Image: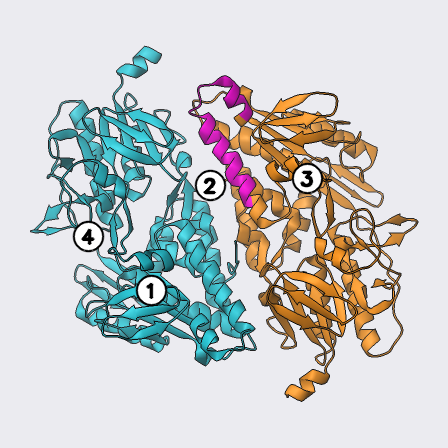
Chain colours: A cyan, B orange
Amino acid sequence: MMNEDMKKPHVVVVGAGFGGIRAAQKLAKADSNINITVIDRNNYHLFQPLLYQVSTACLSIDDIAYPVRATFKKYNNANFRLATVENVDLENKKLVTDNGEVGYDYLLMAAGATTNFFGMKNLAKNALGMKTLEEAVQIRSHVLRQFELAAHETDPIKRKAMLTFVVVGGGPTGVEEAGALSELIYLVMAKEYHTLNFKEVRIVLVEATDKLLPMMPERLRDVTVETLIRKHVEVRLCVQVLGYDGKNLEIKGGEIIPTNTVIWAAGVRAESIADTMGCEQDRGGRVMVNEFLQVADHPEVFVIGDMAHFVQDGRPLATVAPVAMQQADVAAHNIVNSIREKELKEFKFKPVGNMATIGRNEAVVSMGSYKSSGFSAWMIWLVVHIWRLIDFRSKVVVFVKWMWDYLLYDRLVRIITR
Amino acid sequence: MMNEDMKKPHVVVVGAGFGGIRAAQKLAKADSNINITVIDRNNYHLFQPLLYQVSTACLSIDDIAYPVRATFKKYNNANFRLATVENVDLENKKLVTDNGEVGYDYLLMAAGATTNFFGMKNLAKNALGMKTLEEAVQIRSHVLRQFELAAHETDPIKRKAMLTFVVVGGGPTGVEEAGALSELIYLVMAKEYHTLNFKEVRIVLVEATDKLLPMMPERLRDVTVETLIRKHVEVRLCVQVLGYDGKNLEIKGGEIIPTNTVIWAAGVRAESIADTMGCEQDRGGRVMVNEFLQVADHPEVFVIGDMAHFVQDGRPLATVAPVAMQQADVAAHNIVNSIREKELKEFKFKPVGNMATIGRNEAVVSMGSYKSSGFSAWMIWLVVHIWRLIDFRSKVVVFVKWMWDYLLYDRLVRIITR
């Protein structure tokens, strides 16, 4: 048994995100003679598109986090290791982790991206990131705590800083966060903080370029801005953040916004493990891959998703889930064919469209020539996101929570944890 | 307005547990001319009877935690303050908190109980408590992590300590925790850790006296022990714990159990804030109250629930939710009547029965002359607990989760958080 196992090729998948989980499942299903090890520093797969709903008290963590082992339950050839990869040693075909060394025959890197503070240290220290479950829970507790503090604060200057919430970044995450914050505050909290004057609340969405949701057509971008303004979100375009010391947000040109809360959704870079591979990287730390998703000089090493820099039609692909999932299919196929010494497939991304939700009955959807906004777009967004949740239980539970919040203008996950 | 308000009597309720919330709602409803402030160090009401289900990955925190402010949404005369009470000053009728001082005309203390380690410092440091949401999440992460560590541990001695789980305390909490742990491990984890030998797992329930569930009749106590043994739980009665250094659990008589996990459900004492009141207390720190639930010499101060020592039929009442809730009704009534200068009501507890669940289809229920065990008792337990959940959304969500776990032998909240 042991000897047989040792002859089986060993594929290591780093990262249990959309790309990693999908590739591992494909590999496990394709050939029971391949041994697969998935490594992640968390024991769960995170459904990141709904992370902003955890941060705004709509959903709880287990609605969008699914145990990695549960996704492989039926495959005896797939294993999981809870570990943080510290170094990738391409020469000796092994990974160094905080939980021992792991050798491989084929390596699939799918460790994703992390928040990019572009070198601004005081921002990294004082702003709230939005990439992990812990960060989302931290935002939730922090925002709720500001209201509890403000309710008993008599100094109007301090109270104003408690009630000013700045979201930086005009991509889907920033837009969805600002919209959801507005509804949490004006539709839910306003009913319960009888002693607060909600005219003192300020929600600001700051974007460095001249547009929100740059991947959307112009008409939908305009709808997005209008909808946010109607929700009392100040939309500030062409505004560059210089730093944040925990009290004052500094903006290029001299403006200062006094605030206790800066949520940073303004950029990502590849997880730092990419830097240890010794491969060519772009400015965002992403590893350059060829048409088969391999790195240079190491045909046994594949990189996909937010970690990979793949050029199509002269431009690198965006760091979004559909790219990672389509790449997972091709990378799994190419690893199986490498083992069988067959021909590899070239990757080509087929666009599936973009969507973002701004709040109740409000979303923007762009799929090919189909563009939509308002209620119909919002229904499409709901159905797609419920559908993509990994299991039936989450689908039912999330549906119940969304219906409750929608009908009763409520958010019940308003729990401040330490 | 301000002057009018200042003439209104101010009732402060300390604690948002079963007793505090119920009393505050009764007071708010009884008279809109009474101002009520509820103080708690958490912003949520916790449904403690299901805390063990959070610790064993059945339910998530928001299924059993409900924002305090949401319970008073419709009462403008009720307010909430997120604060930890540090001192009760009965002479000057005020509370000192970490969030300012609060004066009162009437005070209702309902701050509940905390874990009692009976002065054993190394136990307090190394064992896992089971009274707060944070502690339950800590148990969940800790237990799941032991399996991830054991899956890659080659030293059999270390692996054995990782896979030994000791629950101390044979009351309902300890019994329910041990039963739920057994099912999590043998029915769920065993399907996913292909490389582990589950014969190495050991679950031990330790109790210092000679019986589990002392409030139950003998027949049901016997059923409880038999059911636990069938679930591979070692039941150890008349075993006294002396200490735990994080590696070895020391037992009176010299036995040592090497284990990474000791869950402490062996005793409670009143929250330490009771010690600052200067009133007579029992050995468990509970404050002595008279037949009207008042403390001596201060008719404006009432104490209820796990903080109160109330003697009925020659014995102090148990620290359980039904006592707290019935006392809340009488205390609220007596505060209103004190304000109106009317006669006070004497408290008398009406027993409502006892129940505990041991696992799938297994519970024990004792209500008056009705005794039941097995499936029928389990159904009663389920209905009662679903029914008592505070809102319709939790009822539906918990029902869906319980059905999912029951039908698929699954537990999806297996999320290790930091």
As measured in the structure, the alpha-carbon distance from the residue carrying label 1 to the one carrying label 3 is 45 Å
On what subunit does the disc labeled 3 rest?
B
Q: Give the camera-side residue of B410 and A225.
A: A225
Q: Amino acid at mark 3?
A: Ala
Q: Which residue is mark 2?
A: B416
As measured in the structure, the alpha-carbon distance from the residue carrying label 2 to the one carrying label 4 is 30 Å
As measured in the structure, the alpha-carbon distance from the residue carrying label 1 to the one carrying label 2 is 31 Å
As measured in the structure, the alpha-carbon distance from the residue carrying label 3 to the one carrying label 2 is 22 Å
Q: Give the camera-side residue of A67 and A89.
A: A89
Q: Which residue is mark 3?
A: B265
As measured in the structure, the alpha-carbon distance from the residue carrying label 3 to the one carrying label 4 is 51 Å
Q: Which residues are magenta?
A: B137-161
Q: Quadrant of the N terminus of chain B?
A: bottom right
Q: Which mark is residue A244?
A: 1
Mark 4 or 1: the one toward you: 1
Q: Amino acid at mark 1?
A: Tyr
- Are discs 1 and 2 located on one and the same chain? no
Q: Which mark is residue A318?
A: 4
Mark 1 or 2: the one toward you: 1
Residue B148: in magenta span = yes
Where is residue A261 drawn, in percent x and y?
40, 65
Q: Amino acid at mark 4?
A: Ala
- Are discs 3 and 4 located on one and the same chain? no
On what subunit does the disc labeled 2 rest?
B
As measured in the structure, the alpha-carbon distance from the residue carrying label 4 to the one carrying label 1 is 28 Å
